[in-house]
């Protein structure tokens, strides 16, 4: 099943500005935009705990990218992908494969 995904990339807070709620406020707004305009939100992170408290869930299944040659695994991203599910997709199996369309730069 293909769906319209809002992908979040490169969210960071400069060290002197951390622990003031800035990233939380930005991600709450991003979550609102995703819920309004997309079926699913996705991101890759090394800090899953931050996103989990904002309603994001870890994707437990294997990840892939769709290339001209077909689906290719992206094992370096497995375990670091997170999704924000809108209510119609609440029954999505987080253990299934997830596939991103190819793009230049980091796939996830």
Image (cartoon, rainbow, N blue to C red):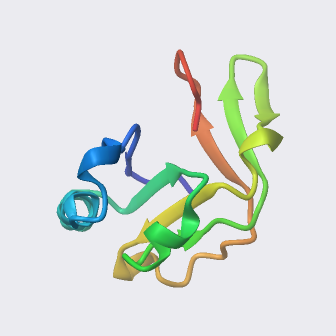
Residue ID at (80%, 32%): 72
Q: Position of residue 49 (x, y in %)?
A: 54, 72
Determine if residue 13 is in view.
no
Determine if residue 25 is in view.
yes
Would you identify the image quadrant in which residue 67 lies?
A: top right
- Quarter the C terminus occupies: top right
Residue ID at (78%, 40%): 76
- Quarter the N terminus occupies: bottom right
Compared to residue 57, the image places residue 17 above or below, namely above
Q: Nearer the viewer, residue 60 or 40?
A: 60
Would you identify the image quadrant in which residue 41 lies?
A: bottom left
In the displayed structure image, the side of residue 10 where residue 99 appears, left or right: right
Q: Position of residue 39 (x, y in %)?
A: 36, 62
Furthest residue to the front?
A: 16
Q: Position of residue 7 (x, y in %)?
A: 40, 45
> How many numbered tags mark residues here?
0
Q: Nearer the viewer, residue 20 or 73?
A: 20
Q: Position of residue 38 (x, y in %)?
A: 29, 57
């Amino acid at each position: 099943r293909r769906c319209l995904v809002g992908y979040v990339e490169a969210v960071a807070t400069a060290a002197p500005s951390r622990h003031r709620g800035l990233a939380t406020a930005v991600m709450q707004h991003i979550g609102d935009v995703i819920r309004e305009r997309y079926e699913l939100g996705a991101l890759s992170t090394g800090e899953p705990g931050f996103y989990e408290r904002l309603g994001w869930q870890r994707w437990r299944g294997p990840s892939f990218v769709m290339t001209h040659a077909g689906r290719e695994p992206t094992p370096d991203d497995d375990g670091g992908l997170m999704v924000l599910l809108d209510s119609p997709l609440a029954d999505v199996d987080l253990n299934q494969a997830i596939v991103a369309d190819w793009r230049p730069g980091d796939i996830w």
